[in-house]
Image (tube, rainbow, N blue to C red):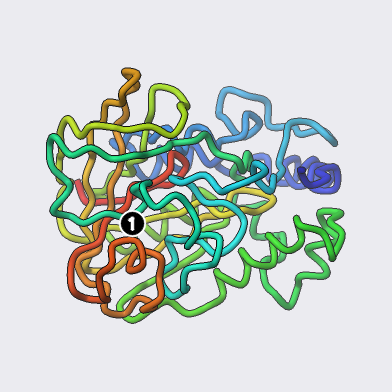
Amino acid sequence: MEFHILPIFAFLSVVVVASHAALSPEAYWKSELPNTPMPKAVKNLLHNEWMEDKSTSVGVGKGGVGVSTGKKGKPVYVGVTPGKSPFIYRYAATEDQLHDNPNVALFFMEKDLKKGTKMTLHFPQSTTPATFLPRRIAEKIPFSSEKMPEIMNYFSVKPDSKEAEIMKNTVKECEEPGIKGEEKYCATSLESMVDFSTDKLGKNVQGVSTEVDRETRLQKYNIAGVEKMAGDKAVVCHKQNYAYAVFYCHKTQTTKAYVVSLVSADGTKAKAVAVCHTDTSAWNPKHLAFHVLKVKPGTVPICHFLPEDHIVWVPK
């Protein structure tokens, strides 16, 4: 199920011509982070029309900015599907989350992050194909709960549809306050994500994402190596379900990031990003992590892997 996309491209064709000289998202990255490689998660979300080596003209109905409600059945495990995100820590676990496969390592303890540990994981491809819009365009599109009727009309979304429910939920999550010690921001463009991350961490940063050889079924992975990234602070950006790429980014002073080398039973290799939270005392006591690990808030560091379309920013 995808949004009707013609209205936005009719709008884009006018805006792009009117702002011909503005930097593309890719060019902005290079200007702000000239010595920082672009992670795969970002490259995959750059629409062809915004790449430097492509024409800047956009026609009605050309390309694809859309959102899907995900696959039918149970949610995938290392990923985010419609409903409350397990990566927003003010939420209690939902009934669906509580009844998911208990053997899947969505959350785990930092002490288990070592060579030889076996975990049951699934790294699916993104079920939300929405790409980045240039900031000059994204900023012209309303993004607030009070403007929701206008947004629904803009994207030709029926107010009582599943797509409308998903969009409302994403905007609401972005508007709610963060937990104690959390600085949060919803980036509606790559440029705004870069600005937020460099504002919090400085210009000498790198963005890293999980990369897997190929999509596989749910299976056991063996940890072949663990590399801690620099510093004990990070900005983590989670891809949201929306009509174009929106990221829920948050920074705390109690976050560690690791790159974990994984090898599965069928030979699939992955370089997975793991994020560990050393202080969970402000999390909702009914959060899924506490249910899965059978621990209480603030007692032990809690970790999780990032899906392939999420990004962690850390100092170099």
Rendered residue at 28%/53% (across/down): 275
> Left or right of 229: which side holds 170?
right
Amino acid type shown at disc 1: Thr
Rendered residue at 75%/47% (across/down): 15
Q: In this view, does 66 lie above or below 136?
A: above
Q: How many marks?
A: 1
Quadrant of the rendered structure where residue 256 is? bottom left
> Left or right of 175: which side holds 214?
left
Q: In this view, does 147 lie above or below 128?
A: below
Dot 1 corresponds to which residue?
A: 198
The residue lying toward the viewer, choosing from 98 and 39, is 98
Q: Residues within 10 Å of mark 1 (few under 14, many from 20)?
A: many
> Left or right of 15: which side holds 309?
left
Quadrant of the rendered structure where residue 82 is? bottom right
**x and y, in percent, of residue 141 in the image:** 72, 60
**x and y, in percent, of residue 262 in the image:** 26, 31
Quadrant of the rendered structure where residue 122 is? top left
**Label 1: which secondary element:** helix
Rendered residue at 25%/70% (across/down): 295
The residue lying toward the viewer, choosing from 19 and 257, is 257
Q: In this view, does 158 lie above or below 171?
A: above
**x and y, in percent, of residue 147 in the image:** 76, 73
Rendered residue at 19%/45% (across/down): 316
| Image quarter (top left, top right, bottom left or bottom right) of the N terminus | top right
Q: Is residue 145 above or below residue 170?
A: below
**x and y, in percent, of residue 106 in the image:** 37, 51
